[in-house]
Image (cartoon, helix red, strand yellow):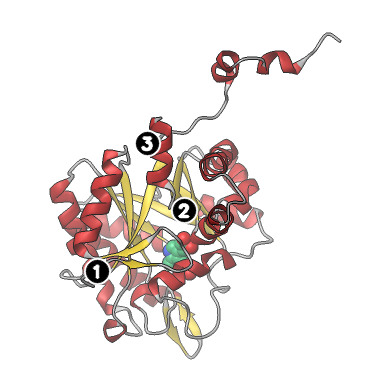
Amino acid sequence: MLSRPRRNRKSAAIRDAIRETWLGPEHFVYPLFIHEGGEDLEIKSMPGKRRLSPEGVLAEVGKAVELGIRSVVLFPAIDESLKTSAGDESHNPEGLVPRTIAALKARWPELSMVTDVALDPYSSDGHDGIVKDGRILNDETVEVLVEQALCHARAGADVISPSDMMDGRIQAIREALDDEGFTEVSILAYTAKYASAFYGPFRDALDSAPKSGDKKTYQMDPGNVREALREVMLDEDEGADMVMVKPAGPYLDVIRAVREATTLPVAAYQVSGEYAMLKAAIVNGWLDERKVVLESLTAIRRAGADLILTYFAPEAAGWLKG
Ligand code: PBG
């Protein structure tokens, strides 16, 4: 036998020297659920994760920063009484998200603040867009998303991340940001976001599930990958700085395809259902938490992701620190 691949695996020194993919806390974006309440609330379907109060979020980010996390993304739970069909609260300058951005930036100016742009937390219909007679109005929705993006930029967001999947929103947001002088605010586009059942726990966490129907007229069909590349071309042309694939673990082939189709940085979102699935096995003692989480994140990076949005961010950062 001339070739014995095991020779390259015989010691930790050799294995470590030739590893093709590695993980570091700089790759992680930590998603945070926030609300107005005075207390942090456990999220049943996401053991270990909580919906954070304004004080709780400062404590949680403090811990994460200590562990090496340099980027967070905010997801608000909004009181039912503030929800409307046009999602007006999404661009209230006194709203929960702009106040939280300002509070976090005041304390950690170096933290990269990512914000989610979509109407679902604010929509009385639980949809990412405005609903009329059972249909999602694309262009009217984009006008509101632009207001939401501006509201986040004015509050100090570094990266605006539209997750709504409306057509044309990247360009509309880019132009509006530039018109107001926010030429340095980045856009991380949810480019290939699938109509996935893996978002279930997230919708529990925020009470943001659609009141009727599903999201299939805007989020992508899980059977498709060429369509993801079409979305990449459009988002690139419209001025996106980074593109995202979501979910991550069950869509590694899409991450790979997107990686090969663009020179832009690629992000992947290890979503709430992926977290819940791993965590369920972990709390039952069926999987080793540290090993399985780091393996799942390594696989997402190996597929071609630069950044990973993951609820395991602080835990993983802690383990990587050693
Ligand atoms: C909403 C949004 C969703 C997620 C991120 N932004 C849910 C949805 O589209 O229904 C899901 C994240 C997760 O499941 O962790 N625009």
Residue 49, can we see it? yes
Which residue is depicted at the point 57% across and 23% down?
Answer: 19
- Outermost residue toward the front in this view: 285
- Outermost residue toward the right in this view: 1
Q: Give x and y (percent) for residue 124.
A: 37, 84
- When the figure is inspected, residue 286 is found, relative to residue 100, above or below; the finding is above
Name the one closer to the observer, 126 or 55. 55
Distance Cα–Cα, label 3 vs label 2: 24 Å
Q: Which of marks 2 and 1 is nearer the N terminus?
A: 1
Q: Which quadrant, please, contains the C terminus?
A: top left
Q: Which of marks 3 and 1 is nearer the N terminus?
A: 3
Dot in front, 3 or 1: 1
Name the one closer to the observer, 125 or 48. 48
Which residue lies under the disc numbered 1?
39
Which mark, by number, is residue 309?
Answer: none
Query: Under tag 1, what secondary structure?
Result: loop
Amino acid marked by disc 2: Asp
Q: Give x and y (percent) for residue 30.
A: 37, 50
Amino acid marked by disc 1: Glu
Asked if labels 1 and 2 touch by Cβ distance under 8 angstroms, the answer is: no
Q: Give x and y (percent) for residue 219.
A: 54, 67
> Badge 1: few (under 14), some or many (20 or more) residues near its Cα, within 10 Å?
some
Which residue is depicted at the point 41% across and 69% down?
Answer: 205
- When the figure is inspected, residue 83 is found, relative to residue 206, above or below; the finding is below
